[in-house]
Amino acid sequence: MKDKKINIAIFASGSGTNAQTILEYFKDNSSVEIKCIYSNNSDAYVLQRAQNFNVATKSFTNEEFYKSDKVLTHLQDNEIDLIVLAGFMWFVPSKLVSNFTLLNIHPALLPKYGGKGMYGHFVHEAVIKNKEKKSGITIHYVNNEYDKGDIIFQASCNVSPSDTAEELAAKIHKLEHQYYPITILKVVEKLLSETEN
Ligand code: GAR
């Protein structure tokens, strides 16, 4: 029997530095294929990054994402086993949550600084405004509520009183790049072991 491979779809909305580290990390892994990068923004730089790795891309409109099965069907046709959100700023509809395993990375220590409207720089601005001494990253499964799925991994960093949102974002990106790919690998290994049983 052919060895099982885990097919991954990455969803991203912007620059895609996390997507880039995931593409690099898995490029020589024969158990994983990054099948396609999906974006709600056809101009997102992440789509260029995908092309640099010869990975397929698919962008979609709000209407297509929420009111049609276009994305769901595309994922099913690609035989996707795992969806990885990497800077994806839209709420994921339940039709995807009920059909796939999904992971998200959030740029704060959930349950603090999560929920609707808490993404990207808004998170860092709120953390600084509240004079938090620590922030960090949370990698979690996605369920039907914003940032409420089971937590898989967290790592923290110090917030200095002088940090700007950009400086804090840079610290957070460093943690994300260090830990997201290896955490995805752990989930891949779990999925592979489940297919063996
Ligand atoms: C990352 O910091 C990620 O945690 C955050 O967007 C950034 C995307 O950066 N995601 C969210 O805020 C989701 N709620 P990137 O495009 O360079 O990977």
Image (cartoon, helix red, strand yellow):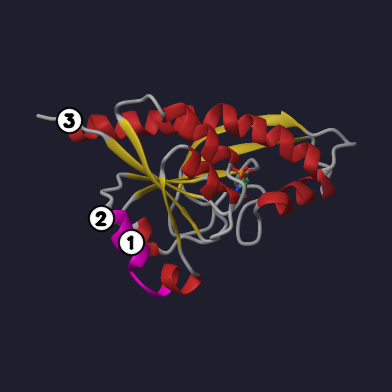
What stretch of residues is rendered in magenta? Answer: 67-77
Amino acid carrying label 2: it is Asp
Asked whether, in this view, residue 37 is left or right of residue 45, the answer is: left
Q: Tell whether label 1 touches label 2 (CB within 8 Å).
A: no
Mark 3, secondary structure of its residue:
helix
Badge 2: residue crowd in 10 Å (few <14, some 14–19, many ≥20): few
The numbered dot on residue 196 is 3
Residue depicted at 51% across the width and 52% down the height: 148
Name the residue tied to disc 1.
72
Badge 3: residue crowd in 10 Å (few <14, some 14–19, many ≥20): few
Mark 2 residue's CB less than 8 Å from ligand 1? no
**Residue 168's quadrant in the figure?**
top right
**Residue 31's quadrant in the figure?**
top left
Mark 2, secondary structure of its residue:
helix
Mark 1, secondary structure of its residue:
helix
Front tag of 2 and 1: 2
Please tell me which of labels 2 and 3 falls first in the chain.
2
- Front-most of residues 45 and 80: 45
**Which percent across, then down, holds residue 187?**
38, 33
146 up-or-down from 54: above or below: below
Asked whether, in this view, residue 23 is left or right of residue 100, the answer is: right
